[in-house]
Amino acid sequence: MANYKNSINDFRLPAEWEQQSGIQLTWPHANTDWKPYLEDITKVFVDMAKVITSEELLVVATPEIVSASQWGDLEKLNRERELVGIYLSAHPLDEYSVILENVCNVTMLELSNLTPLQGRDLVMGGIVTNVREGQTKTGKPYGIAKVEDYSGSYEFAFFGSEWIEKRNFFMVGMFLFLKGKCQPRQWKQDEWEVKVGNIELLPEVKDKLIDKITINAPLSSVDDEMITDLLSIVKEHPGRAELCFVVKDEDGEMHVSLSSKTIHIEVEKTVMSYIKSQPQLSFKIN
């Protein structure tokens, strides 16, 4: 007990002007008295931290992190976009980029001006990012679905039985492959619209949309390292697409076409990333 009393008697609070090794801040959080003012006080603490760290050491005491289930890739990307406004580490559509860039013939951004698209058959793809549903004044159901690709987004409107028929495809987070036509509106022939006729899920059609990939390479670039890399990729990604090569001389006047009768490949993100990382290589789909 004597030691305890001595330690208490010897204890004192140093004045704020005395020499110190650092400052500790207990960060405000929802389980403290700061909860009603958390947004405002957090900004204050951030400003305090900036000033302190410009002069001396800052130790921040934080609440224990509560364990939670791990987010999936899509959820992580959505949270990332929600926080900073854009996708940073990846894009949800990266797995389908080969389809969007080589099979689709129009982007969502291009749909904002239908004049050059009049009368054309359209092939599109993207991810559903928002859906609004309701009823018209006459009681007909309708749905307006926003679909986004790398270029931007476009809202597709459906009314009546057409919306009832297609609504199950248009759920937020769904990856869609769309076919349609730019045609005059039924009751206003001087106005044009995008009429969606066929909808499929991108994960289900991705493989069957690509029948062949042809890789073009100059003869000078074909060495042991490239051959080893390509063999490794082909073995790791077997699929149904025919694999072909066109090897050209330096002048491009002569070439040799090669195709494999036994080896087929899945044209997916890893394969395309490798080809695009090699500036001497080019490719053609189908």
Image: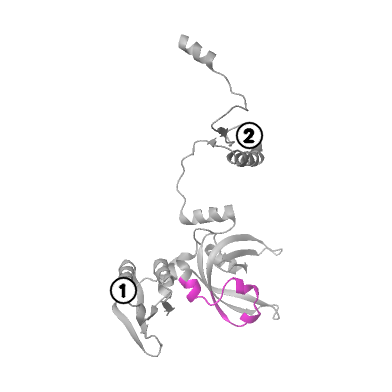
- Quick one: 214 or 211, which is closer to the camera? 214
Q: For mark 1, does the 10 Å Cα neighbourhood hold few (<14), some (14 to 19), or many (20 or more) residues?
A: few
- Give the secondary structure at mark 1: helix
Residue at the (53%, 15%) spot, across then down? 10
Residue 180 falls left or right of residue 252: right
Name the kind of residue labelled 2 in the image.
Answer: Trp
Q: Is residue 182 magenta?
A: no
Q: Nearer the viewer, mark 2 or mark 1?
A: 1
Task: Tell me how far mark 2 sits from mark 1, CA to CA.
Answer: 62 Å
Residue at the (53%, 63%) spot, across then down? 168
Residue 182, quarter of the rendered image: bottom right
- Quick one: 182 or 43, which is closer to the camera? 43
- Give the secondary structure at mark 2: loop
Start-end of magenta stretch:
98-123
Task: In the displayed orientation, state which residue is furthest to the top.
Answer: 2
Residue at the (46%, 68%) spot, across then down? 96
Q: Is residue 30 above or below residue 104?
A: above
Disc sitting over residue 227 in the figure: 1
Q: Is residue 108 magenta?
A: yes
Residue linked to disc 2:
34
Residue 165, quarter of the rendered image: bottom right
Q: Position of residue 221 (x, y in %)?
A: 36, 77
Q: Are marks 2 and 1 in contact (CB under 8 Å)?
A: no
- Quick one: 23 or 100, which is closer to the camera? 23
| Mark closer to the chain start, 2 or 1 | 2
Task: In the displayed orientation, state which residue is furthest to the bottom.
Answer: 253
Q: Is residue 6 above or below residue 218?
A: above
